[in-house]
Image (cartoon, grey):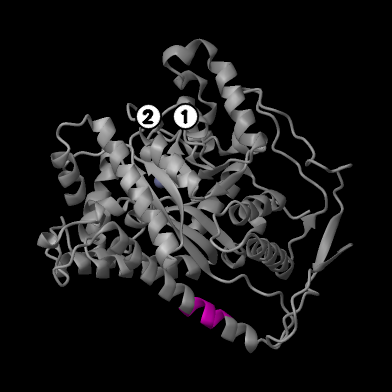
Amino acid sequence: MATGASKFTDAFLSEIPKTDLHMHLDGSMRISTIIELAKKNNVELPDYTVEGLRQKVFKSNFSSLVEYLRCFKYTVAVLQTSEALERAAYELACDNFAEGVRYFEVRFAPQLHAHLPSKASEEGQVLDIREVLRSVNRGLHSACDEWNKKMHARQATNTLDCVREPEYHCAIIVSALRMFDASFSEYYRALVQCHKHEGMQRIYGLASMSLVTAAVAARDEEGIPVVALDVAGAEKGHPARDHQAAYQYAQRHFLNTTCHAGEAFGPESIYQAITLLHAERIGHGYHIFSENMVSGKKKDKAKALVNNIIQYVAERRITLEVCLSSNLGTMPGLKIQDHHLGRMLQHRLSVALCTDNRLVSNTTIVKELKLAINTFGITLKQLRDIVITGFKRSFFSKSYREKRSYVRCAMNYFDFICSKHGLELPRHCYVAPPASPQTGDIPAVAAEGATQVSTAPFVHKPAAVYRNGKSAFAVPTKESS
Ligand SMILES: [Zn+2]
């Protein structure tokens, strides 16, 4: 059985089809683009060279959360025009596709970019929420179009038998903010000042409601692939209930939901996300096991609360969007070997590995996979599960039948790439990491539905051929070796 980090070469990790379900536009820009946009739009930066900004702002290690969050001040400052948003979205898509990401969902807070004509440098037009969404979508659409055309041309001229590649797709998630003040953006400044008579919690709710209504309208009236609502920002002291009405609106209009929770606050934050917002996925969920972080009235029953949350999240396949490098960046004392990903896998939680912020966390999806593989001894079977979970739990914007076909295509292509690299997947075999003597976590178990654990490998024959773009796709055959 081919397992272990040593078998997973960079070429293999690059070629397998991948997803990124949790990635912020303003945290994932190219530094060279930030410099160009800053010069063009008179935005002040502490340095105007890539190396200088790496040293002063976008560091490889951060000593505090404040230092980490400071990066966004500059990226948001240059993303204040339609042209800049389109360019950033286009480049982000190209960067993802270049490392073999076939599907991603990019999230951002449109209200950080929206403003009135007074500050617009482009034709004196209002950059409203809808225009922010349109601009990002234009960039994404151009990149998808370009990459799919190249991919189809590649397959049409391929004289060798090979499995059909999954197309390149992407979608948009809009992020509301748990908290903001007048300094966050021109939009938020106007909102806070115009609603001085309201409490801030009420204003947070107003903002998230105005965002979700604009997002649903952009999807329904213009076909912009906005697929979900998210809420991001400081969790402590900024509860999910402020955004309950916006989430209810999303659900009534069949907009999916995810929610940053358990990133910088304990299990109660995840509890609120799943019971008040009914989030289908959780951004991070890092502190799902952190009984010691339960506070308030629930402190006495912390163990039961944590067990119930784990059970609920596991059974409903609420996917945790795990971002390893980002967690290390926002929790400077955390060592990768102590990250909870290992426990999440032992508990058979639904996990997708994501980057969060490609620039700010100085990462890529391949780097995240390598980090997980090297730290937690991820097997080929586990790697396949994680990667395919990304496809299955995506908020794919097309029909359910199209999604099923797309996921099947990604699975077959994954297996084909394994076969190409001489890696053999074990049949009906799942071996969980050993139970931790410290935590007493659950022991290794066979996969659900497996009647027996077999270590016999199977070989994928790439019989599903796509010859000169003419033959129809068929499911690959599998046979025991
Ligand atoms: Zn995030």
- Residue 468, above or below 66: below
* Mark 1 crowd level (few <14, some 14–19, many ≥20, 10 Å Cα): some
Q: Which residues are magenta?
A: 146-151
* Mark 2 crowd level (few <14, some 14–19, many ≥20, 10 Å Cα): some
Residue 55 versus residue 137: which sits nearer the camera?
Answer: 137
Residue located at (50% from left, 53% from top)? 21
- Residue 419, above or below 186: below
Q: Residue extending furthest top? A: 300
The reply to whether residue 65 is in sight is no
The quadrant where residue 114 appears = bottom left
Amino acid under disc 1: Gln
Asked whether the residues under the numbered discs 1 and 2 touch, taking CB atoms below 8 Å apart as contact, a structural biologist would say: yes
Residue 424 image position (x, y, % from top left): 77, 60
Q: In the image, 240: left or right of 422?
A: left
Q: Which residue is mark 1?
A: 272
Residue 145 versus residue 196: which sits nearer the camera?
Answer: 196
Image quadrant in which the C terminus is located? bottom right
Residue 138 image position (x, y, % from top left): 37, 71
Amino acid under disc 2: Pro
The reply to whether residue 66 is in sight is yes
Inter-mark Cα distance, 1 to 2: 8 Å
Q: Which residue is mark 2?
A: 239
